[in-house]
Image (cartoon, grey):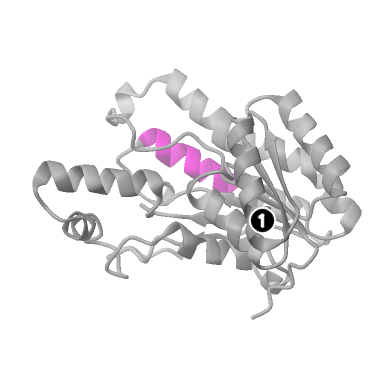
């Protein structure tokens, strides 16, 4: 299927690693020009160079902390100046989950909650707000917010709240932008094979004297596809949502975790 992305400009925050990087690579392969946004300028420039060389598309690396209004505004100005506009925003910049022991809800700290919300929720809103004028000028746009299946289960109150808030943000934006040609959706990955997860699997396999496949199988017990999705597989869904082909999809959240046993979402 031709995703009709030729000539579109896509901005991907958190675009130098994991799902963001896989998405940037795929969008470029499909004909889009891409902007990789990271807190680290050297990483953004290096990844942009690699993508441009591999695909022949324009690729721009920019440094921006999405918790900083001025930094986000400067990023959007650079996109307009150097790329001529923007049509697609993939919000993927967030503090990683599952890196620390999860406290019970009654012991959750406000500082942790505030930090996650400022990055993953307000950061997403800052980027959308900064790039929407460019999408409005083009008369077409797609905003895809990367949330997580933590929105649909308990066990990590901070993770649940931040991911549910991302869905609420996306739906409110979708309603506001109705009729403009700009659609807003949310994607819920589960545990996904990324660089960090691969390293975690290898470390656990070594510590437990098991193979990586055995460790992965134990973590994928409730995943209907029988294994963990890869970042590239998640990116395929994001690329479709970023394309004109997704015209009938707007304001909804889509599970891309491989299917969860026993869960009914409607």
The percent position of residue 57, horizontal first and vertical second, equals 73, 59
Quadrant of residue 238 within the rendered picture:
bottom right
For label 1, the residue is: 53
Q: Nearer the viewer, residue 95 or 161?
A: 95
Front residue of this view, candidates 138 and 233: 233
Q: Residue at x 23, y 57 (%)?
A: 216
Instruction: Say which residue appears at 61% left-offset and 33% top-offset.
Output: 42
Q: Main secondary structure of the magenta part?
A: helix
Q: Which segment is the magenta one?
A: 157-168
Image location (x, y in percent) of residue 206? 15, 45
Say which residue appears at 13% left-offset and 41% top-offset.
207
| The quarter of the displayed image where residue 248 is located | bottom right
Relative side of 146 to 58, left or right: left
Q: Is residue 3 left or right of residue 87?
A: left
Instruction: Give the total number of marks visible in the rendering.
Output: 1
Horizontal side of residue 139 vs 171, given as left or right:
right
Q: Is residue 228 visible to the viewer in this orientation of the structure?
A: yes
In the image shown, does 219 or 155 lie closer to the viewer? 219
Q: Secondary structure at mark 1?
A: helix
């Amino acid at each position: 299927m031709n995703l009709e992305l030729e000539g579109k400009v896509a901005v991907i925050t958190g675009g130098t690693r994991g799902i963001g990087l896989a998405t940037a690579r795929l969008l470029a392969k499909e004909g889009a020009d891409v902007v990789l946004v990271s807190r680290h300028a050297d990483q953004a420039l290096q990844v942009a160079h690699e993508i441009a060389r591999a695909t022949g598309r324009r690729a721009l690396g920019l440094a921006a902390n999405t918790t900083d209004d001025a930094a986000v505004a400067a990023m959007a100005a650079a996109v307009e100046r150097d790329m001529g506009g923007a049509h697609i925003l993939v919000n993927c910049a967030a503090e990683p989950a599952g890196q620390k022991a999860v406290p019970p809800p009654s012991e959750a700290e406000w500082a942790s909650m505030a930090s996650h919300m400022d990055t993953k929720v307000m950061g997403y809103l800052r980027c959308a707000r900064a790039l929407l004028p460019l999408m409005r000028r083009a008369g077409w746009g797609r905003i895809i917010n990367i949330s997580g299946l933590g929105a649909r289960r308990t066990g990590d109150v901070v993770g649940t709240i931040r991911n549910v808030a991302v869905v609420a943000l996306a739906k409110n934006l979708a309603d506001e932008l109705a009729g403009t040609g700009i659609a807003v959706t949310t994607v819920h990955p589960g545990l996904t094979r990324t660089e960090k997860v691969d390293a975690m699997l290898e470390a656990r396999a070594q510590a437990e004297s098991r193979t990586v496949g055995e460790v992965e199988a134990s973590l994928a017990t409730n995943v209907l596809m029988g294994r963990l999705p890869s970042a590239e597989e998640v990116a395929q869904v994001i690329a479709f949502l970023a394309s004109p082909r997704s015209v009938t999809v707007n304001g909804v959240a889509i599970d891309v975790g491989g299917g969860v046993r026993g869960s009914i979402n409607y």
